[in-house]
Amino acid sequence: MKKIVLLFALLLSFWSNTIHAQTKKAEPIQVQIDLATIADDKVNVTVVAPKLQQDEAVFNIPKIIPGTYSIDDYGKYIENLTAYDAAGKTLVVEKQDDNSWIIKNAKKLAKISYQVNDTYDIENTHKIFSPAGTNIEAGKNILVNTHGFVGYFTGYIENPYQVKIMHPENLWGATSMTDLDNSNTQDLFETSRYAELVENPIMYGKKDVSTFTIQGMDILIAVYSPNGVHSAESISADMKRMMTAQKTFLGSFNANKKYSVLIYLSDVQKENDAHGFGALEHPTCTTVVMPEAMGKDELAEQLKDVVSHEFFHIVSPLTIHSKEIQFFDYNKPKMSQHLWMYEGVTEYFANLFQVNQGLIDESAFYSRMAGKIANAASMNDTMPFTTMSANVLVEPYKEQYLNVYEKGALIGMCLDILIREKSQGQRGILDLMQKLSAKYGKQKPFNDEELFATITALTYPEVGDFLSTYVSGETPIPYDSFLAKMGVTKKVIQVAGNPFIKDQKPLITINPANKEIIVLPANPLNAFFTELGLQAGDVILAINDTNYNLDNIYDLIMASEGWKENDTIAVSIRRDDKNQVIQGKVKLPMEDRDGFEASNAQLSKLKEAWLKG
């Protein structure tokens, strides 16, 4: 009986707080972010509180945000949080944990203020993924991932937000939000609730943007390149080609009117800069971090893969998602079972659309899938994917997270193949996602435990069997059997490897005494070294007039990824205490790998429907 009474008391309290929050929904949370007077790489933030009726209030900075699947504790980078009443007197504040502060006598609360420290300067002390982190470099670049700057009051997360940002005139804010202030030194943004604010990062810097329109969608490409190596103009042609292909592949699926790609290029020679390369998705934006040292072609290739992946997130989870995502708890998260769809199908689309739209050929697509099969085999292949997803924040499931991009994509591929087979090529997984979007959508989440039954009802019983056997079950997927349904069989293929790596082992090392790069003994060295006559013990001083040592060896590896067969190359070396320059051509080392080829002509029509339909 006591438990029942206590339960009623808790429910009444919950309903009371919920009703109270709903009645206050129209009152906006007002925020001021001062980027004009940065000191010690810290930004001052002021939050005007709503009118509170309780004696204590809790202010929170997110512990985790959607799309990252890791505990990051952004509150650790908040300093000197102070609460004030209307007369400017301070109120008592107690820190509850890394991300929450309890404010006493909250009925008198007028505002709080605090300082934000950035994460890029201290990346060696935490594991925050760089595209989800923050950068504060006065007068040059401020990456305002809003979850790192702005928090929320418990019970008021659904209130609208008004965010005023003061900034130097030479810094321009790139974002998908609309600036409601015409001033050159002040921006004003409004969002319907906190979740919408979190999904809208802003990158301030010297205005380096390119814009274009694709099928009614306005695209903004913004670039920060600290040493001026790349520009939005140099990137935009490749981005337009790629995003046009994506829109064509999706058809009418996406109705966004604006989409922004914010590209932060890191100076990897600086210790206090971003080193976590990749991208983070949002409904109308992607935030990208890449090394500035990449060549133009290699950067374009990387952007094609990572930006396309993030763009396809508009399908899932940004449109099709469970209640865990719709009502995401930033400080007490409950994770969904369906990372196979959110990340896996998204990654599959990011590869499928390229062969579908002619950006890569069939052999390249098969090679990519073969690589994912090999990578997935190195992970726990019997761990149920749904179990891993629901528990991804803790071990041993956390260490398997990267498999969402490998086995997750392969789950998407096998489902696509199965639906194509059962429908005689008429439908595939994109059709399924369109049907799920029509049934659910941005404002109608599904129940986690009901998704498989819904998918089965929209497709075939065999699809339901696949999901229960291979996704929620422990049985490894027989990929060869599924690919054979499309007339595709296994074949050993040759692919170009990295010039400085053989059998996953480096062929160069570093002399710790002077940071010089030395060719290691190997039996034998690969074709790149033998073609140029490089020998064990040679000290590599420069390549193509760029000096290299330990400090920029990453630049060398990145540059080599962009080399093509028979490119002209000049290698400056020291051998037997004598300097010399070796002129020659690049010969890329070839490696045998498992691959696939279309070998059954009778199934060619079905295969074409799969890859080109």
Image (cartoon, rainbow, N blue to C red):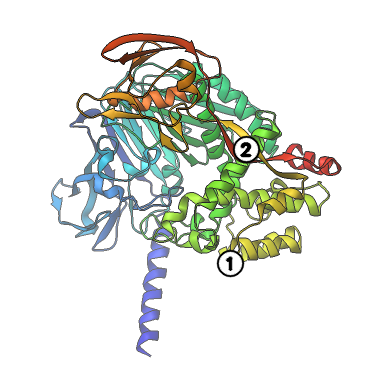
| Label 2: element kind | helix
Q: Is residue 478 visible?
A: yes
Residue 494 point in image, percent of width and height = 61, 33
Return the residue found at the far right: 602
Q: Nearer the viewer, residue 135 or 346?
A: 346
Residue type (three-letter) at the residue carrying disc 1: Glu
Q: Quadrant of the N terminus?
A: bottom left
Task: Tell me the kind of residue under disc 2.
Answer: Ser
Q: In the rendered view of the protein, which quadrant contains the C terminus?
A: top right
- Residue position for label 2: 367
Q: Position of residue 567 (x, y in %)?
A: 52, 14
Looking at the image, is mark 1 or mark 2 earlier in the sequence? 2
Name the residue at 15% across, 56% down: 92
Residue at image mark 1: 449
The answer to whether 227 is drawn above or below residue 177 in the figure is: above
Query: Looking at this view, is 427 or 149 the one in front?
Result: 427
